[in-house]
Amino acid sequence: MQTRHPNVVMDAWPSTKTPCEQILSVVLTSSDRSPLSVLELTALAGANLHFYQMQWPRCSILFDLESAPLDLESEDGLPLKLERLGERLRSPSVARAALVKGAERRRAWAEEDRCRAAWALAVLLHSSDWEELENRDYLVRFLASGLVAPAPWASMSTAAAMLQLVHVSDGCHVHSLLAGVGVAEVLVQLIQHTSAPVQQVALKAIIYAAASAQEGDSLGLSGTSVVPAIISIAQLGCYVNQLAALEAIAALANGSIAIADQFKVVIPDVLEFLVHERDEMKEVAACALGNLMDAGQDAVIKASEHGCIPRLIHLSWHAKSSLRDFLLRCLWIITKWETSRRMALQHGILALLFQSLQGEDFMRGQVNQRLVLDMLLAYPYDARTAFLQEDPGRRTRAVRHMIWIAQRGAPNPASAKELLKQLFPSLLG
């Protein structure tokens, strides 16, 4: 993996972002079609540390995704407002076709208004109850078809509006409508933008679309160049975008085996992130690795070739509980295959699993119970030998926990009973 040294300037991130109310107060107008002034644009972008990167201040505005939605007095007229914004999204195309006096000025105003309309759309979608709207399918197609029209001067506002449109359009049916008008291609273009904030917002849209898909690739991303674009950010992006890129890899790999297979090339980079200095990066990397390996044995083999197994076992000994959950799932996937299961045995996985049996978090974590018990059952002969070599006190605690699970009717009593029989065949046979 290519080493990337921190860049204090390029890695800077806005300390404050632009909330909904401030954006709407400036950009949502129904009658004033004049461009935003330089002062207005600067006022919106002034708090953003990425301002210096962009030619236009409007491209530097970073939408505060966590800001409280506006309290709309009434949503009765919302469909009409959204339809008017959709028309304004198309205004540059109309202006370019105009062969009248003052066409250049008209085009400049139209481009500014298109940017304002996209910002207003992002805020309204963020603040509205989308499920209650009539003609929802029509509005989805109408707004999306306006956003996919080329608008390189309005990348940030387009990305923000795209994110909100994907977010409120929860469900495969609506996502298929977005796919039909080419939203996936535009999102891929946006994650390839030179602006780090634009990349981040577009990545969030991809993450949400992939995570909310009930099955497969509902947005149609598999037919695009999304994989190399995300890999590039994961390898060379700033920290927050690397984190978002790994989240996107995890979400896309979980929803589509075909996409997961394309992401196999990034497994060595993901393994490097497992030893990152920040815990959140380690957790996202472990989640991504698990989803990638879950696609099949080829991915497990590739990860094993790059030292995945000893690294996972070593990290699991000292990891915090939240990270350990992801690491145990990775090891569980590895032990499903004979070759990698033998490799894990050689690197001391049984000692780790018996240690896990004794922890209090093992008693509380039902999923981890199942994973640990399943892995021990995968070693019917080796597990008994390793168990007898454990310290007597450690054996006692492990047996006490297994008996508790077997007798209390917990979610994994059958596995606990089976493991007890495996460890003590003469007593429980």
Image (spheres, rainbow, N blue to C red):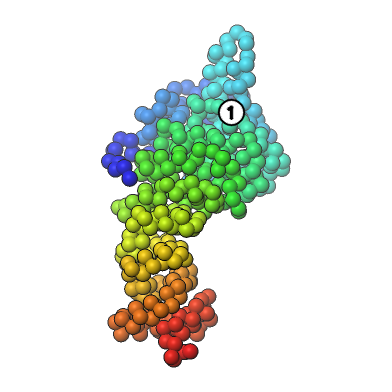
Residue 263 or residue 121, whichever sits in front: 263
Residue, far right: 135
Residue at the (62%, 9%) spot, across then down: 100
- Decide which of 35, 297 is in the foreground and name it: 297
Where residue 35 appears, x then y in whole percent? Answer: 52, 21
The residue tagged with tag 1: helix, strand or loop? loop
The residue that mark 1 highlights is 149
Please indicate, yes or no, whether residue 134 appears anywhere in the rendered image.
yes
Residue nearest the viewer, comparing 85 with 281: 281
Q: Residue lying furthest top in this view?
A: 101
Mark 1: few/some/many CA within 10 Å (<14, 14-19, 20+): some
The residue at 41%/63% (across/down) is 340
Depicted 256 relative to depicted 190: above or below: below
Residue at 63% in and 20% down: 94
Q: Residue at x 50, y 55 (%)?
A: 295
Task: Place residue 176 in its image quadrant.
Answer: top right
Q: Which residue type does callout 1 highlight?
A: Ala
Q: Position of residue 364 (x, y in %)?
A: 44, 73
Quadrant of the frame with the N terminus: top left
Task: Please tell me whether residue 384 is drawn above or below residue 43 in the rendered image.
Answer: below
Residue 211: percent from left, percent from top: 54, 51
Instruction: Name the residue at the bottom extreme.
Output: 427
Res 397 quadrant in image: bottom left
